[in-house]
Amino acid sequence: MLSAFLESVMEPEEGWISPRRMGEVMRMQRQELSRVLQVHRNTLTRRPESPELQSRLGQVVRIISRAAAMVGRDVNRAVLWFRYEPLAGFDNKTAEQLVAAGHGDAVEVHLDMLTEGAYS
């Protein structure tokens, strides 16, 4: 079963994550979203189904979905956490900054640790 967040950002009947919908949920302009995802901004509109873009969008969806699950399934709180909450173990960088720097895997490991009861 797909998470509610994933369903909300998928392009109906296409089977891929919509960069437009993702930008709306994340409250990001196209240029800002492309910076975080490390793709050219035109890729978001010209090739939204590209495997590279879908992989990067998928990672952000996983992070937001997991963070939302930790805060009572509140996607808005999870987005705020992703964008603005400094993470002590990462020189007070936000999850957004880490993903933009290519360290999304570290954010996922951090969420694993929090799920297992470690403190940030």
Image (cartoon, helix red, strand yellow):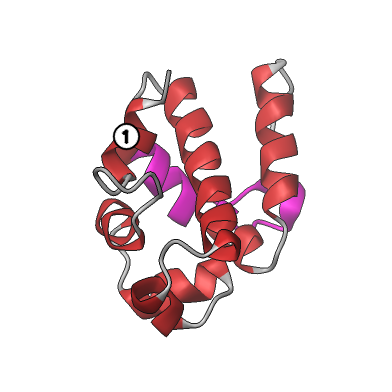
Identify residue type, mark 1.
Glu
Vertical relation: 20 (above or below) 74: below
Q: Position of residue 63 (x, y in %)?
A: 55, 40
- Which residue is label 1 attached to? 7
**Quadrant position of residue 37:** bottom right
Q: Position of residue 55 (x, y in %)?
A: 59, 54
Residue at screen point 31% across, 61% down: 23
Which is more toward the observer, 37 or 45?
45
Magenta region's main secondary structure? helix
Is residue 40 shown to the viewer in this render? yes
Is residue 119 shown to the viewer in this render? no
Q: Position of residue 76 (x, y in %)?
A: 30, 40
Q: From the viewer's perspective, is 62 left or right of 15?
A: right
Secondary structure beneath dot 1 equals helix
Residue at screen point 44% across, 61% down: 49
| The C terminus lies in quadrant | top right
Residue at screen point 24% across, 58% down: 24
Q: From the viewer's perspective, is 18 left or right of 38?
A: left
**Quadrant position of residue 29:** bottom left
Magenta stretch, residue numbers: 77-95
Q: Quick check: is 80 in the magenta stretch?
A: yes
Using a 10 Å C-alpha cutoff, classify the residue at mark 1 as few (fewer than 14 neighbours), some (14 to 19) or many (20 or more): some
Q: Position of residue 50 (x, y in %)?
A: 51, 65
Q: Quick check: is 88 in the magenta stretch?
A: yes
